Image: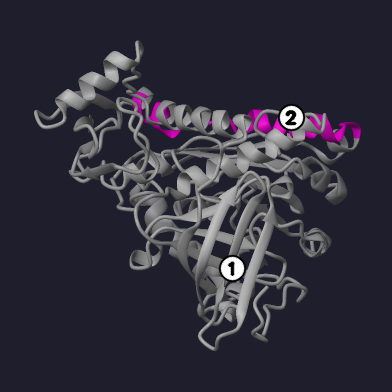
Amino acid sequence: MDCKNFERFDMAKPPVRTKWYLRPITILLSLPDVWKHRAKITKVRTEELKAPYVLLCNHNAFLDFKVATKAIFPQRANYVVAIDGFIGREKLLRNVGCICKRKFTNDIVLVRQLSRVIKNGDVAVIYPEARYSLCGTTAVLPESLGKLCKVLKVPVVTMICHGHHANSPFWNLHDRGIKPTEAEMTCIFTAEELAAATVDEVNRKILEMFQYDDFAWQKERGIATKYEGRAEGLHKVLYQCPVCKTEFRMNSKGTKLFCEACGSSWTMSPLSELSFDGATEQGSADAAAAQSAENAVPHFTHIPDWYEWERANVRAEVEAGTYSTGDLEVHVDSLPNAKKFVRLGNGTMRHDMTGFHVSGVDDEGNPFSMEIDAKTQYSVHIEYEYLGKFGDCVDLNTLEDTWYTYPHGRDFAVTKMALATEELYYHYRRLEGRPCKPGLA
């Protein structure tokens, strides 16, 4: 770890019940976007529902928080929020009821915090995917979720929103005017039903409710977008060309997604479907050679299908024992507290079959390092062009610090590292004979 003696965020400070004077402000700040997108909220089995309860929400955009606020108002709630959400506004976020969490860490303190929320008689709002979905489909859920619900002993409610990713995808946050959006708020276990269910039964039900596909939803509803830059940034997710198989040379502009290696290109329709345009004259020979070498070249129309093809390719590398990014030059920013990012220094990062390895030297000449074992990390948080100026990064967490690690150059994709993190975790579980439940880790 780094040698600097930073002040650390106080994770153990008890959660604050939302201040009475802030409750109307939270709803007033939420309603404009909820109305703008004509959000339809359907409630199922909630007639007798009263706080306290656990609300589990899927996560695709900031609009998720606003719809959840509208759905549960005027009940008090505490929201689990990542530490970067607290930067420069810790007092405000604590006063509106936010609880800080460092992503993808086993944090027993959070269990105590949520128990306090329930004891206060309020709603505990959790986004268990712990990151925005990369392509509008379900991200991996922690297997500990069912156990947490059993510990809290109150009704379990899910809120699954549709249209938020199609409107403002993680790889391009521009508002595309998708409306109406939809959300279903469903009580999946009363307190009595929860007590009678096993942990596995609770997990199965949560996973069943969390199945969603935003682009399929958009196509089924026929909701088109007029945004002319709708494909821009998509290459961050779709980093490998299915024609020539080259990685890290995809790019995008306007409505086009294209491979700079072979010249193949695709057009993204107003319904977010992809159509293959073929190859440019310059790249047609390379594309033709690649197609002749492969009998079946996939031409994906559905964005999540391309993403899952990439996952399968990463899985093959993991199973062959060959996965590695090699040593990447990086710079590292630390976020020990909610005041501001601190430049830790320059160094190298490698992600391989054993996990993440980061090391370097700070501006005072002191060494720093972080090792995260692949067997212990079921997922990882990534960012694309973080804050619009820092580039893509991998967000590595311990219980005391968060490192934003920014690789240099072009020969990497943080999306591939995210996929590999999940596939490595599953790989070692299989080798150890531990059960692998699809969608859970």
Would you place residue 170 above or below residue 393 in this image? above
57 in the magenta segment: no
Q: Residue 359: which disc?
A: 1
Assess disc 2: are there few (<14), some (14-19) or many (≥20) residues with their C-alpha within 10 Å of its C-alpha.
Answer: few
Q: Nearer the viewer, residue 14 or 241?
A: 241
Residue 35's x, y, as percent? 38, 50
Q: Main SS type for the magenta part?
A: helix
Dividing the image into 4 quarters, which one contains the N terminus?
A: bottom right
Task: Tell which residue pokes out farthest to the top in this image.
Answer: 295
The residue positioned 36% from the left and 30% from the top of the image is: 218
Dividing the image into 4 quarters, which one contains the C terminus?
A: top right
- Residue 4 lies in quadrant: bottom right
Task: Tell which residue pokes out farthest to the bottom in this image.
Answer: 364
- Residue 244 lies in quadrant: top left
Tag nearer the camera, 1 or 2: 1
Would you place residue 65 above or below residue 192 in this image? below
Magenta-highlighted residues: 196-219
Task: Tell which residue pokes out farthest to the right in this image.
Answer: 196
216 in the magenta segment: yes
Q: Is residue 236 left or right of residue 71?
A: left
Kind of residue at badge 1? Ser
Q: Earlier in the sequence, mark 1 or mark 2?
A: 1
- Residue 240 lies in quadrant: top left
The answer, for residue 97, to whether it is visible in the render is no
Q: Nearer the viewer, residue 6 or 315?
A: 315
The residue positioned 62% from the left and 75% from the top of the image is: 368
Residue placed under numbered mark 2 in the picture: 436
The answer, for residue 371, to whether it is visible in the render is yes
Q: Is residue 359 left or right of residue 150?
A: left
